[in-house]
Each structure stands twice: as C-alpha cells, then as structure tokens.
C-alpha cells in the first residue's frame, strides 16, 4: 500500500487531508508534536476502515526527521509528502518579537525544507505538496514576518517544480486564504471568523484539484 506523510496532522487542514486521503486507499503517516492528537486522528481513520500510523516528529529537528526517515524507509512505500505544519504571529512589524520571527522561519521554512530534502529521495513516483497560504502570493498588513516565511516557501516550491519537472515526482503548491481552525484561537488578527472557510471544505478542494501543480483558494470575502 502506498503511504503519504502529512505534517501537522493532528488538527485542522492536516487532519482533514488525512481523513480524505485515507478514504482513497493510502496509508497515512500522521506526524506532529502532540502524539495524543495524532492518535485521535488515527483512531478516526481506523474506524472508517482506513489505515494510519502516528509519529511524534518535530520538523525543526533534523535528528528527529532522520530517525523518522529510517522507520519510513524500512516499513513503508512512500508515495507522497504533504508539508502542512505551520505557525504564524501577527501585528505591527516594529513590535514583532525576534523569537517569534525565528519560530516562523524554523517551522514554516526550514521545517518544509528539512522534510522535503530528506524524503524526496525516497519518493520514486509520487508528489510533494506544500501548503503555503495566500500570504505567499502577496504582502499583507500586519503580516510581515508571516508573509516573509511564506514567500520563502513559495520560492523553494517553485524552484523544486523546475528541478523535478522532468521526473516522476510532482511538486505541488497550495495557496489558500484563512481557515476556521485552532490556528486563530490565540490571535485577534481575524476580526470576523465567519468569513473563514472550514478546513474540511479546503481539503476537499485540494483533493478535487490534485492533478494541478498550483492550487489557489481565496478566502471568502
């Protein structure tokens, strides 16, 4: 059975993608920092007669990624990698704390880069999908640091699309607007959350447009 790794799979879009792809017959390798959340998703997939395995992996830690790679290469046939995990802090640029800026770069940029560089060689035929956000398409007020990290992921993704265009590996970019997920629970950046689309709806759009290399899903206005 072909396997797909999904980072940040314990909630939100990662969870919804895991549920959908498991229904399509893939073995889902759920990764994240909180094993309890991953196990809950795994149980839900198993209840729906799918297959999933949970792994506590910090994508900012090269050593943890390398250990995870050893398990994957010995036990699974890797078909895809979905770099979904991300973090964001918002507000005026002058008040953005340096540590928060570093965290966004570590998770959003280096997490995606680390996972891609380690697991691309294991995918002989398949795909890598980077969940980027429309913050990677244009600058936004009070999102300077977040946009900087997402523009970096966009540059990485577009470069990999060129590098792998003659191979059997598709490099995919997903740019979506804000979603109604726990991502916003500790932020007042979004004033009207009613305009945010559900992660389930976004996940279905992604799956429906799987053949495309670039998927843009604007937020409701």
Image (tube, helix red, strand yellow):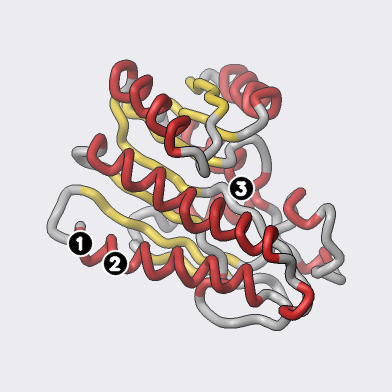
**Tag 2 residue:** 159
Identity of the residue drawn at 74% across and 71% down: 96
Which image quarter is the N terminus in? top left
Q: Position of residue 194 (x, y in %)?
A: 83, 65
Secondary structure under tag 1 reads helix
Q: Is residue 143 above or below residue 37?
A: below
In the image: residue 158, left or right of residue 46 = left
Does label 1 or label 3 sit earlier along the sequence?
3
Identity of the residue drawn at 36% across and 63% down: 157
Disc 2 to disc 1, C-alpha distance: 6 Å
Q: Position of residue 209 (x, y in %)?
A: 42, 58
Identity of the residue drawn at 45% across and 51% down: 112
Identity of the residue drawn at 55% across and 72% down: 148
In the image: residue 152, left or right of residue 3 = right
- Comparing marks 1 and 3, which lies closer to the viewer? 1
**Tag 1 residue:** 163
Judge by depth and name the residue closer to the eye, 56 or 201: 56
Crowding near the residue tagged with mark 2, few <14, some 14–19, many ≥20 C-alpha atoms within 10 Å: few
Q: Position of residue 134 (x, y in %)?
A: 56, 71
Disc 1 to disc 3, C-alpha distance: 27 Å
Does label 3 or label 2 sit earlier along the sequence?
3
């Amino acid at each position: 059975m072909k396997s797909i790794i999904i980072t940040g799979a314990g909630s939100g879009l990662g969870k919804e993608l895991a549920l959908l792809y498991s229904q399509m017959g893939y073995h889902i390798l759920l990764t994240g920092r909180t094993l309890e959340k991953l196990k809950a998703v795994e149980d839900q997939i198993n209840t729906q007669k799918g297959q999933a395995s949970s792994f506590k992996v910090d994508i900012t830690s090269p050593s943890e990624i390398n250990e995870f790679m050893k398990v994957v290469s010995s036990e699974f046939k890797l078909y895809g990698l979905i770099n979904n995990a991300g973090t964001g802090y918002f507000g005026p640029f002058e008040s953005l704390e340096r540590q928060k800026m570093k965290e966004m770069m570590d998770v959003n940029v280096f997490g995606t880069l680390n996972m891609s560089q380690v697991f691309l060689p294991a995918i002989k035929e398949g795909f890598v999908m980077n969940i980027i956000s429309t913050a990677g398409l244009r600058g936004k007020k009070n999102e300077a640091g977040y946009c900087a990290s997402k523009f970096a992921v966009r540059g990485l993704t577009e470069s990999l699309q060129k590098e792998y265009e003659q191979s059997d590996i598709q490099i995919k970019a997903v740019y979506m607007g804000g979603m109604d997920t726990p991502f916003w629970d500790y932020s007042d950046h979004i004033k009207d959350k009613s305009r945010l689309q559900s992660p389930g709806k976004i996940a279905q759009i992604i799956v429906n447009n799987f053949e495309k290399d670039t998927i843009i899903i604007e937020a409701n206005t």
